[in-house]
Amino acid sequence: MRLQLDYKLGVAERLAHEEFRSGSSLQRPAYFRQAIPSLVLCGLGLVASYKGQSVTLLAIFLLAAGVLTVDAWKKGLRWKSNLSAAVDKEPANSVQLVIDDRGIQETVEQQVVSFAPWSAVRSYVQLERIWAFNLAGGYTAVVSASAIRSRSGSGS
């Protein structure tokens, strides 16, 4: 039996693959988590200035906490818009994947051909955007989940 999938592999799929490989979420950097130590210090300053009845220090620590929170929020928004721009700007690669009795053959941009026999396939995992086939030597074949869904939905 032979199955041929033709699909585009873009930035979103590459990010999903990198997230899978690294084992950590690339969805959004933890700007708020990075600001926590400074916010804790601001909180301690707020308590101390309240106990010491210093309105000026209370205002300074409130302002500092507000600036840290707004800065983390703005960085998160910029990160999201930059990621969207990269996904829109980066061209997707045209990929043809052939799965048959011999193994998995991937052709990228009708030029680069990779082949892995079934003995080299260690495991696979289905994620939201991709299927990742873990191969010998630490390599991974990435397949767009949409290509598999559209193929299975076509009844072929």
Image (spheres, rainbow, N blue to C red):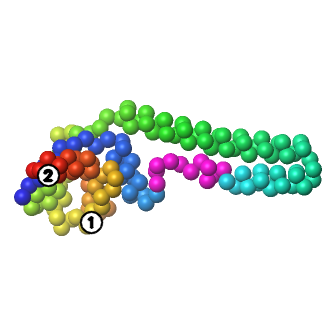
CB under 8 Å between callouts 2 and 1? no
Place of residue 146 in the rendered image (x, y in percent of width and height, measured from the top left):
26, 47
Q: Point out residue 65 in the picture as x, y percentages from the top left corner.
A: 74, 45
Circle 2 sits in a helix, a strand or a loop, which is it?
strand
Residue at 10 percent across and 50 percent down: it is: 156
Q: Residue at x 54, y 37 (%)?
A: 78
Q: Tag 1 or tag 2, which sits nearer the N-term?
A: 2
Residue 88 figure quarter = top left
Q: Which residue is mark 2?
A: 98
Q: Position of residue 123 (x, y in %)?
A: 27, 66
Q: Residue at x 54, y 38 (%)?
A: 77
Query: From the viewer's perspective, is residue 35 above or below residue 87?
Result: below
Which residue corresponds to mark 1?
Answer: 123
Residue at left 61%, top 53%?
33
Q: Which residues are magenta?
A: 25-35
| Type of amino acid at the residue the image marks with label 1 | Ser
- Asked whether residue 79 is in view, the answer is yes
Residue sitting farthest toward the left: 1
Say left or right for 72 vs 81.
right
- Mark 2, Cα crowd under 10 Å, few <14 / some 14-19 / many 20+, is some
